[in-house]
Amino acid sequence: MSTRPLPIYSTEQDFYTALSRRDERAYQFLYTESLPSFRYWVLTNSGSEMDAEDAFQKGLMSFLLNLETGSYQLQAGTRITTVVFEYCKRVWLTELKSSRLRTRATMPDTVDMVDTADVVKDLERLDIVQAVRQSLGQLKDECRKVIEWFYVEDLSLREIAERLGMKESSVKSKRYDCAEKLKTFYLKTANQ
């Protein structure tokens, strides 16, 4: 395993073990180590700060689900932050290709297609689905609707804004706030 010193963890294996145990400090460390470089990459690839946050949240959740279900196993010489970056990068490239962003963003020359089979398989695991449902139930009604419309029904921010009678920029902020609340509820529920 890599012996690159980490502020909290002496090896990548220690970091991986902490993430596997759902250690909140490990989650925080992963977030702070990975988000800045990913945000910069999205900003240089047709995205905004909010786009970077969205793609990062989706990629990080996919990585953590794969880690929790055993679909992701640490390989010798691999940096976890690099793996997370790749998960998030694939999400953003898929977003660029989607119809939601097609009108305002140009496609990069090369695109790695996301393998959604693992994600779908992971989401079918009962314990994870129950934790997410329980977390959604803890959100206020409007927050729950925004999350479900955006992530489940795949509505655009503009469509959600029309449904709620709000400005699109307000819905964008609300969706981010609601996603953060959902993440907090999920981490509490998953750690019980």
Image: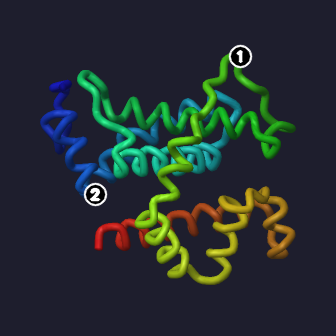
Is 137 drawn above or below residue 148 in the view shown?
below
Q: Nearer the viewer, residue 156 or 17?
A: 17
Q: Amino acid at mark 2?
A: Arg
Badge 2, how many Cα within 10 Å: few under 14, some, many 20+? some
User: How far apart are the alpha carbons under marks 2 and 1?
Assistant: 37 Å
Which disc number belongs to residue 64? none
Relative side of 36 to 162, left or right: left
Residue on which the image places disc 1: 109
In which quadrant of the rendered image does the C terminus lie? bottom left
Going by the image, does 77 lie left or right of 149?
Answer: left
Indicate the secondary structure of the residue bearing disc 2.
loop
Q: Are marks 2 and 1 in contact (CB under 8 Å)?
A: no
The mark lying in front, picked from 2 and 1, is: 2
- Is 164 above or below relative to 77? below
Farthest top residue? 109
Residue at left 60%, top 39%? Answer: 91
Give whichever of 170, 67 is nearer the camera. Answer: 67
Which residue: 46% across, 47% down?
60
Q: Which residue is mark 2?
A: 22
Give the mark, 2 or 1, whose residue is nearer the N terminus: 2
Q: Secondary structure at mark 1?
A: loop
Q: Relative to residue 171, is residue 74 drawn left or right?
A: left
Which quadrant of the structure image shows residue 40? top right
Residue 61: percent from the left, percent from the top? 47, 51
